[in-house]
Amino acid sequence: MVMLGVMAGCREKPVTDAARDSVPGNHQTAPSPARAGSGDGGGSAEGRAVPAADPTATLLAAALASDPEDVDRALRALAATGDRYTEVVAGWLTNPDPAVARLGVRALAAIGTKSALMALFDQLAKLPADSPQAWEWASILADEAPSAQRDLLLEWVLDPAATEPLRDAAQRALARDADAALANRLVTLYDSASNDAARQALADALRQMQNPELVDELVRLAFDRAGISDPMTVAIWDTLGIIGTPEAVTALAALLASSALSAADRAALADALARVDNLDALPLLRALAAGQVAGAGPTVQAAAHRALANFPGE
């Protein structure tokens, strides 16, 4: 089951009655539970199966009521049905009411199967890449698509036909639950990629992985690639700077102090260190900027000074 949270600061836009009526499959009336003693010849309701409510109808009703908690409950119920309602929900994506279409995106992401995500992929690919709707859908996909679908998300990252919003969504969805295995997989795919576009897409995907628990693995990768000058190596440095823990800062400073760097790599490493804005690293940055850490030469000190400008009052 895919557990979904309410998007911060976002309430479902009420779905209009006209739009609801135009959604395929929503003219069916859910059967009412049988009642004991109803005289319908069916005997007691006890022991008879009570028809379950159509989760798509329940979802639309929750959206009409503008109740985010009810919407989330309905999405979880829909997810439990697997692909049973994928075709119905996919039809919502072409509804003229943007609220219904947006609900369809969330519903397909909640279902989370390959078929559901491919239906969303196909429709998103038809939207103009610079349209607000494409980026809105991509944002929902990034926040709510199950990261367990790693293979499919990686396909989108590497698909040369993928639009920018779709590729960005796939990169961010992968990053939500990134671990050391995924970071290594991206690096391995990068090293075997046959074109610059694929390599850049993989490097950009790694930059999205901002979980502090990845720092140890990123540090290992950074030192393993210390002699390699390419976009993936720079992405590893940048990601360490974005996460900015003391361990990340220590590694960046040590790499920057190396005498084996080219001028371009030294500048990229300095930029990565200058990105740090993690308060946990503030004491270390002060020490580096003051030259109080062994091996922190002028280049490290200058980068640390730049990072201190990210903190109010420094």
Image (cartoon, rainbow, N blue to C red):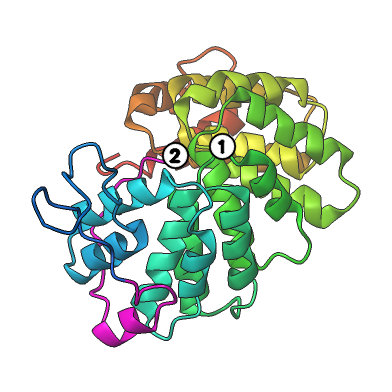
From the image, tell me which residue sits under label 1: 148
> Which residue range is magenta in the image?
1-28
Is residue 271 among the parts visible in the rendering? Answer: no
Q: Nearer the viewer, residue 193 or 305?
A: 193
> Is label 1 in contact with label 2 (beta carbons under 8 Å)?
no
Q: Quadrant of the C terminus?
A: top left
Instruction: Give the main secondary structure, helix, strand or loop, of the magenta stretch.
Output: loop
User: Please, what secondary structure does the residue beneath circle 1 have?
Assistant: loop
Q: Is residue 25 magenta?
A: yes
Q: Is residue 108 magenta?
A: no
Mark 1 vs mark 2, CA separation in Å: 36 Å
Q: Nearer the viewer, mark 1 or mark 2?
A: 1
Q: Is residue 148 left or right of residue 69?
A: right
Q: Amino acid at mark 1?
A: Ala
Residue shown at the point (54%, 40%) measured from the top left: 147
Q: Nearer the viewer, residue 292 or 95?
A: 95
From the image, tell me which residue sits under label 2: 307
Question: Which sits earlier in the primary sequence, circle 1 or circle 2?
Answer: 1
Q: Residue furthest front?
A: 41
